[in-house]
Image (cartoon, rainbow, N blue to C red):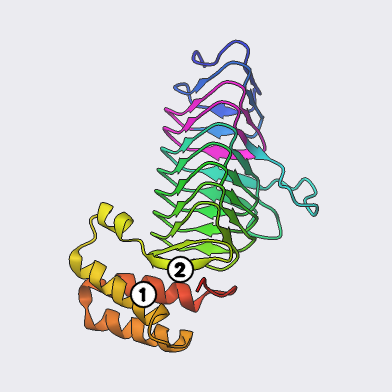
Amino acid sequence: MALVHPSAVVDPGAQIDASVSIGPFSVIGPHVRIGAGSSVGPHCVIEGHTTIGRDNRIFQFASLGAAPQDKKYAGEPTELVIGDRNVIREFCTFNLGTVQDAGVTRIGDDNWIMAYVHIAHDCVVGNQVTMANNATLAGHVQVGDWATVGGLVGVLQRMRIGAHAMVGFASHVNKDVPPFMVVDGNPLEVRAVNLVGLRRRDFSNARLSAIREMHKLLYRQGHTLDEAMVAILALGQAQPDAAADAALLHDFLKTSASGIAR
């Protein structure tokens, strides 16, 4: 505990690895666990049943593990679980889960979460996600791996943002955003395939071509959703390089309870 500033308040019940650094005036509650190599800046409050993995960098004024902003919450021992190697910038607020869902708000690994981001109760954020300043997730939202959520984006309760999707600045997300797509606006509209992001992740030309064809099947050829899903699955069967991408998109569409962005 040599790396804890003398002005920080760390409850004796907290489980803090000896390599963790905690800045001035931060407060760490009794049910908090923080893994090796993580750092907590000054004036942070980490409370509740919160588990933070290894090598996270938490900047000043973050509030992690506070009670959910849900009037039904009655003090149940729900959780916030944060993985490894995340960057969490200034004034972020991540809340505990609720018993009305799985009871856990979960953030994965290697995420880049900018200032003033709010992640509400029972959200599930995957890995390698980027969330820009003031992005806000209401309760029960799911964000897939490698998704990008732009600044000032508001995501309605229980919406899903698919893997590799990108949500543009100041958008209102009130429908599910399928994997690989770029959306923006209010009302929300699909603009194109997220080619820039996919190329940065070394998608092959064959995979990119197949994903562009899936976009056409879903949005440009007048198919019903059921017809597009059948065609996307057939495309994946015909093009082995794209089979996993087609299955990802098909399964997302099949399980959408709120409808998809069009």
Quick check: 115 above or below 226? Answer: above
Do the residues bearing badges 1 and 2 touch, measured as CB atoms within 8 Å?
yes
Say which label, 1 or 2, has the lower sequence index.
Answer: 2
Q: Residue at x 56, y 29 (%)?
A: 15
Q: Residue furthest left?
A: 205
Image location (x, y in percent) of residue 141: 58, 58
Looking at the rendered structure, the secondary structure element under dot 1 is helix
Looking at the rendered structure, the secondary structure element under dot 2 is strand
Q: Residue at x 30, y 85 (%)?
A: 234
The verdict on residue 65 being magenta is no
Quick check: 96 above or below 230? Answer: above
Q: CA distance from mark 1 to mark 2?
A: 10 Å
Image location (x, y in percent) of residue 78: 67, 48
Question: Which residues, given as a range, are shown in magenta?
Answer: 35-63
Image location (x, y in percent) of residue 215: 36, 74
Q: Residue at x 22, y 78 (%)?
A: 239
Instruction: Indicate the amino acid at tag 1.
Output: His
Q: Which numbered circle lies on residue 215? A: 1
The verdict on residue 57 being magenta is yes
Q: Residue furthest top?
A: 6
Q: Is residue 173 left or right of residue 111?
A: right
